[in-house]
Image (cartoon, grey):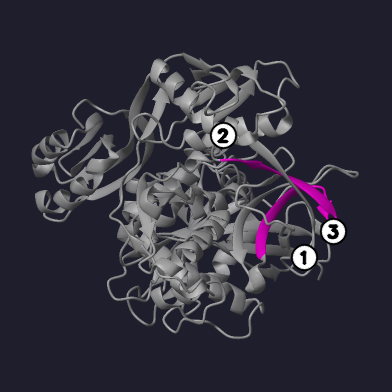
């Protein structure tokens, strides 16, 4: 049967909950692969990188496909480790629905709570799958209480487990009535009215309401099973097909293609393959496309090119609205490149807060190391590769595990060794006010730069990056001189007067001049940093440091000790709720103190605390820091 609808579904979980194993089971049970891969054996379909197979973790998002009746399901298997949060967030942008995995043994973990918070914020339709019901220590009933308390109260099981925690564990179906109907009534007024006023809702009405509330992201059906053994997977698939909404079809008639690149993979021979989710229109091989790219400094550039390779997930010849394809364009695409003006579910990930310096231990590998890092930055623009001091390269990262994986990737895929300096928290500078400076030609007694440059620096909106504009008459400078000034402005802003990158500012060229006989682009490249730094000094800059919002669940008798310790670590508290069973403490903490909090909390709470944190913007650096 030819598929008539498409579902793009992400599988998300804490590390080791079984995402890749579930993907393998789904593909095998529906004939997409003829052999069931194993994470332990390192032969799974989606973790195809050597590093992923050795470590047994997912590092890059992968896409696989299987068909159920008339529905094609594209599975996006995403990383579970917090250091690869950007990969998860990119995948969420292109999904129609999600499956959130929990282990029946380990239960709700800190990363699980962060993921569910994000899914609920995006109102992304989500099913919950409790995996590993056959493992010793599995506790599906107690876990349901934890899910309602820690993740969301709007959840109900559509399956039950017999002989949990034994090899004989099996799954039985449960109709959406009784407690499930009562839970559904909390988000559906029609079900509530039927339960209170009568007549009681019939099974068909409950099933319809369940589908509607799952599709709008307000309710979460829960299933049980075992990915390795296959128990409960059929029930989960029925839930995917019956409860998650398919990708909407594009508008009728021919339309310009609209989509987003959410992953990039290197291929042999230096080619890069980009994964594109298409929302409207269609893409065929050899078609000429123009992608829009937001540069790190806030500019938007165009990336034109003809499609030289197109591999639609599912095997179609043409990429149509709602589907995903791997494609190549000369010059290469990057994660986040957009086809048309895409506004659906803009990415939610924050920039990394950790920065490090990378050095080649062998001088002859310095140039290959830099080239390799630039190639990796094309795959992941959040790395923000730029020159560092004394021949090093500066990188932005999310954590130490990402650093280890990056070192292994450089060694295995590029054949270069790298030494990483200890990571430190990344600071940024923002202009405090307006500042203007200018220099007239000829400069320094006719001996240096034949150029006239005047620059105005002003604060810009948060998140705007660094913009550049002109107040001078168009054509007053040759194009090469204009380009030299603009490029040098952006390069100079990588290190402000306090040594940190400058962001959220607007630089305007307000005066210009040149000598047709003597001036060169090098004159403008040499003078621009001098004028810009003087303008920045007159504007003044403020250093900002990143903060993380935290949640800490602690036993009631440890509340005083925990809050005292967090206050010592400069926490700003936003709330504390709870009672005899425990307290939930929330607030914000400087990113430089989060690691200390994570190390001290277990000792203060007998190891019973649950901690989670997420980026929460930045604040001015306090004096003396």
Tell me if residue 54 can be seen. Answer: yes
Along the horizontal axis of the image, is 90 left or right of 109? right
Query: What whole-number distance in Å separates the C-alpha atoms at marks 2 and 1?
Result: 39 Å
Q: Is residue 378 above or below residue 308?
A: above
CA distance separating discs 3 and 2: 43 Å
Distance from Cα at disc 1 to Cα at disc 3: 9 Å
Dot label at residue 596: none
Measuring from the top left, give residue 160's x and y in whole percent. Answer: 43, 65
According to the image, label 3 marks what residue?
Answer: 284
- Vertical arrangement, residue 524 with respect to residue 311, above or below: above
Which residue is outermost to the right? 253
Contact, CB < 8 Å: mark 2 with mark 1? Answer: no
**Mark 2 Cα-neighbour bin, 10 Å: few <14, some 14–19, many ≥20:** many
In the image, which residues are magenta?
A: 272-295
Disc sitting over residue 525 in the figure: 2
Comes first in the chain, label 3 or label 2: 3
Of callouts 1 and 3, which one flags the residue occurring earlier in the amino acid sequence? 3
Q: Residue at x 78, y 52 (%)?
A: 305
- Label drawn at residue 309: 1
């Amino acid at each position: 049967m030819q598929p008539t609808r498409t579902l793009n579904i992400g599988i998300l979980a804490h590390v080791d909950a079984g995402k890749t194993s579930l993907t393998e089971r789904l593909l095998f049970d529906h004939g997409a692969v003829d052999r069931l891969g194993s994470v332990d054996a390192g032969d799974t379909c989606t973790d195809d990188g050597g590093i992923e197979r050795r470590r047994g973790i997912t590092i890059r998002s992968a896409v696989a496909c299987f068909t159920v009746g008339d529905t094609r399901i594209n599975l996006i298997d995403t990383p579970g480790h917090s250091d690869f949060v950007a990969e998860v967030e990119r995948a969420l942008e292109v999904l129609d629905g999600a499956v959130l995995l929990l282990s029946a043994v380990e239960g709700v973990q800190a990363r699980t709570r962060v993921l569910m918070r994000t899914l609920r914020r995006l109102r992304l339709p989500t099913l919950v799958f409790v995996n590993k019901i056959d493992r010793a220590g599995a506790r599906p009933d107690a876990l349901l209480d934890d899910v309602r308390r820690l993740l969301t109260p709007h959840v109900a099981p559509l399956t039950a487990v017999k002989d949990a925690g034994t090899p004989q564990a099996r799954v039985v179906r449960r109709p959406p009535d009784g407690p499930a109907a009562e839970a559904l009534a909390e988000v559906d007024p029609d079900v509530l009215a039927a339960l209170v006023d009568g007549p009681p809702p019939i099974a068909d009405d409950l099933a319809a309401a369940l589908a509607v509330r799952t599709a709008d992201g307000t309710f979460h059906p829960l299933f049980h099973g075992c990915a390795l053994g296959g128990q409960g997977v059929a029930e989960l698939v029925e839930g995917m097909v019956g409860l998650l909404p398919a990708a909407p079809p594009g508008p009728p008639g021919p339309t310009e293609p609209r989509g987003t690149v959410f992953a990039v993979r290197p291929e042999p021979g230096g080619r890069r393959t980009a994964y594109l989710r298409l929302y409207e229109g269609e893409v065929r091989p050899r078609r000429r496309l123009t992608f829009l790219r937001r540069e790190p400094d806030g500019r938007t550039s165009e990336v034109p090119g003809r499609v030289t390779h197109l591999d639609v997930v599912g095997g179609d010849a043409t990429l149509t609205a709602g589907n995903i394809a791997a494609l190549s364009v000369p010059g290469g695409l990057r994660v986040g490149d957009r086809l048309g003006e895409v506004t659906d579910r803009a990415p939610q990930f924050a920039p990394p807060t950790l920065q490090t310096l990378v050095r080649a231990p062998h001088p002859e590998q310095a140039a290959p190391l830099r080239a390799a890092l630039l190639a990796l930055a094309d795959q992941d623009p959040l790395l923000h590769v730029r020159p560092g001091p004394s021949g090093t390269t500066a990188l932005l990262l999310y954590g130490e595990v990402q650093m280890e994986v990056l070192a292994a990737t450089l060694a295995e895929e590029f054949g270069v060794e790298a030494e990483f300096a200890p990571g430190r928290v990344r600071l940024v500078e923002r202009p405090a006010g307006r500042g203007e400076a200018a220099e007239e030609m000829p400069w320094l007694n006719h001996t240096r730069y034949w150029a006239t440059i005047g620059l105005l620096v002003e604060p810009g909106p948060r998140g705007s990056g660094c913009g550049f504009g002109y107040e001078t008459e168009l054509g007053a400078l040759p194009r090469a001189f204009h380009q030299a000034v603009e490029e040098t402005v952006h390069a100079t802003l990588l290190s402000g007067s306090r040594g940190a990158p400058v962001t959220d500012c607007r630089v305007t060229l307000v005066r210009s001049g040149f000598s047709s006989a003597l001036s060169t682009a090098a004159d403008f490249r040499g003078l621009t940093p001098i004028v810009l730094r003087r303008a920045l000094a007159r504007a003044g800059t403020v250093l900002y440091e990143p903060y993380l919002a935290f949640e800490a669940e602690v036993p009631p008798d440890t509340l005083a000790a925990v809050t005292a310790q967090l206050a010592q670590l400069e926490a700003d508290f936003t709330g504390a709720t709870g009672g005899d069973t425990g307290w939930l403490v929330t607030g914000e903490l400087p990113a430089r103190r989060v690691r200390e909090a994570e190390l001290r909390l277990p000792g203060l709470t007998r190891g019973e605390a649950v901690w989670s944190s997420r980026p929460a913007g930045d604040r001015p650096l306090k004096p003396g820091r």
